[in-house]
Image (cartoon, rainbow, N blue to C red):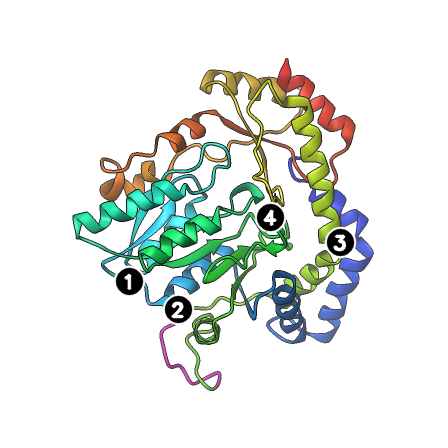
């Protein structure tokens, strides 16, 4: 059994994907070109924003956003304590300081109430200037952007949406990667929309920021290839990856529907025995992960052992809060209190989730877990 079944996806769509890659190989297109431009237009239209700028990976996408805003030394950037490392990693890259915020116990996304408290605490201390919030669409469900944006606006902060796990999710009819002043995503293979390597994208309606990001991602270029007007980076999406993504977009919504069906089957069988994921009213998840909560660490270890014995893969996302990461010990270990994150890190467990799961596989997984 596969945790993420990319093999079946490829086999089912091999003809279209192979054809797209072959056409690029035959045309000698490997960096930039028409497929990348076409993908950016398709993604912008899908999300419902003016600009999409592709880049090498989701981490670079976050960094490019902070660079475009001029976030730097002396600035505080508020980050959820329960997330993948890159969300916080990019903040020190621009010499700013990450401030960790606790999460909602039901959705695992940033708590607007704890965000408000963290901002007030930083202002009271007076050492750092609050500049931006990075909200994460964890496991596929968008964060509470209406409340988070209200808090950010009240304190004059920029809002960056990390939609690496959330692409395809929605609040009402508004899609993920359209909720931030700038939004980003990742096309890492196991993400909801993944390529066959690394890839990422930045989304915004702001013309000035879009122009800056297009410059920063190609060595700070100006009017031409050898006119460098700022210090930038090398972060371009390979043309072959763009070709793969263009084909995957054709069946992406069908995959989302199937994952939502599988999630409903999981919840129907597990609800009442373990804490199952809670999707807010009016929200639509792209189900990057299906994550349950067990009673304690011992029960989680025992459950994982029995799943492994039955040849069922399971993964812990995430074992350690951001504020407990060794690299952040000097700035946060003593001053940060995120009890919900700490509890969920000790009890959460992610089960196989992909659009090619079969109903009988879900039944087997649930039977073993419940035992």
- Indicate which disc, 2 or 3, sits on the residue closer to the N terminus: 2
Q: CA distance from mark 2 to mark 3?
A: 33 Å
- Who's the residue at 29% across and 34% down the image? 337
- Who's the residue at 60% across and 48% down the image? 191
Residue 362, image x, y percentages:
71, 27
Quarter of the image for the C terminus: give it.
top right
Asked whether 27 or 177 is in front, the reply is 177
Task: Tell me, for residue 210, which label it has, or none.
Answer: none
Task: Kindly tell me whether residue 320 is visible in this rendering.
Answer: yes
Verify CB contact (< 8 Å) between mark 2 and mark 3: no
Q: Secondary structure at mark 2?
A: helix
Task: Tell me, for residue 251, which label it has, or none.
Answer: 3
Main secondary-structure element of the magenta-colored stretch? loop
Residues in magenta, as a range = 224-232
Task: Tell me, for residue 68, which label it has, or none.
Answer: 2
Q: Is residue 108 magenta?
A: no
- Indicate which disc, 1 or 3, sits on the residue closer to the N terminus: 1
Asked whether 261 or 60 is in front, the reply is 261
Q: Is residue 230 magenta?
A: yes
């Amino acid at each position: 059994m596969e945790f993420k079944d990319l093999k079946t996806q490829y086999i089912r769509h091999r003809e279209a994907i192979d054809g797209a890659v072959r056409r690029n190989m035959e045309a000698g297109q490997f960096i930039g070109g028409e497929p990348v431009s076409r993908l950016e237009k398709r993604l912008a239209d899908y999300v419902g924003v003016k600009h999409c700028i592709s880049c090498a990976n989701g981490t670079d996408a976050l960094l490019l956003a902070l660079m475009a805003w001029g976030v730097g030394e002396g600035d505080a950037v508020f980050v959820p304590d329960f997330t993948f490392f890159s969300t916080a990693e990019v903040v020190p890259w621009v010499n700013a300081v990450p401030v960790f915020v606790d999460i909602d116990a039901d959705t695992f996304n940033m708590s607007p109430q704890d965000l408000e408290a963290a901002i007030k605490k930083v202002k009271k201390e007076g050492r750092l200037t609050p500049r931006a919030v990075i909200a994460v669409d964890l496991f596929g469900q968008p964060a509470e952007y209406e409340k988070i944006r209200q808090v950010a606006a009240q304190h004059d902060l920029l809002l960056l949406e990390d939609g690496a796990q959330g692409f395809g999710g929605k609040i009402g009819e508004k899609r993920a990667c359209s909720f931030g002043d700038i939004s980003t995503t990742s096309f890492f293979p196991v993400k909801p929309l993944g390529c066959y390597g690394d890839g990422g994208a930045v989304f915004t309606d702001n013309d000035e920021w879009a122009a800056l990001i297009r410059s920063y991602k190609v060595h700070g270029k100006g009017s031409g290839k050898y006119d460098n007007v700022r210090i930038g980076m090398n972060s371009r999406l390979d043309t072959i990856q763009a070709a793969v993504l263009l084909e995957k977009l054709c069946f992406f919504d069908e995959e989302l529907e199937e994952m939502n069906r599988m999630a409903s089957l999981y919840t129907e069988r597990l609800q009442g025995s373990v804490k199952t994921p809670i999707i807010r009213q009016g929200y639509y998840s792209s189900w990057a992960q299906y994550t349950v909560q067990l009673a304690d660490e011992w029960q989680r270890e025992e459950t994982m052992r029995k799943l492994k014995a039955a040849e069922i893969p399971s993964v812990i996302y995430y074992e350690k809060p951001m504020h407990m990461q060794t690299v952040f010990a000097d700035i946060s270990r003593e001053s940060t209190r995120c009890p919900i994150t700490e509890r969920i890190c000790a009890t959460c467990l992610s089960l196989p989730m992909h659009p090619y799961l079969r109903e009988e596989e879900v039944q087997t997984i649930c039977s073993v877990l419940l035992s």
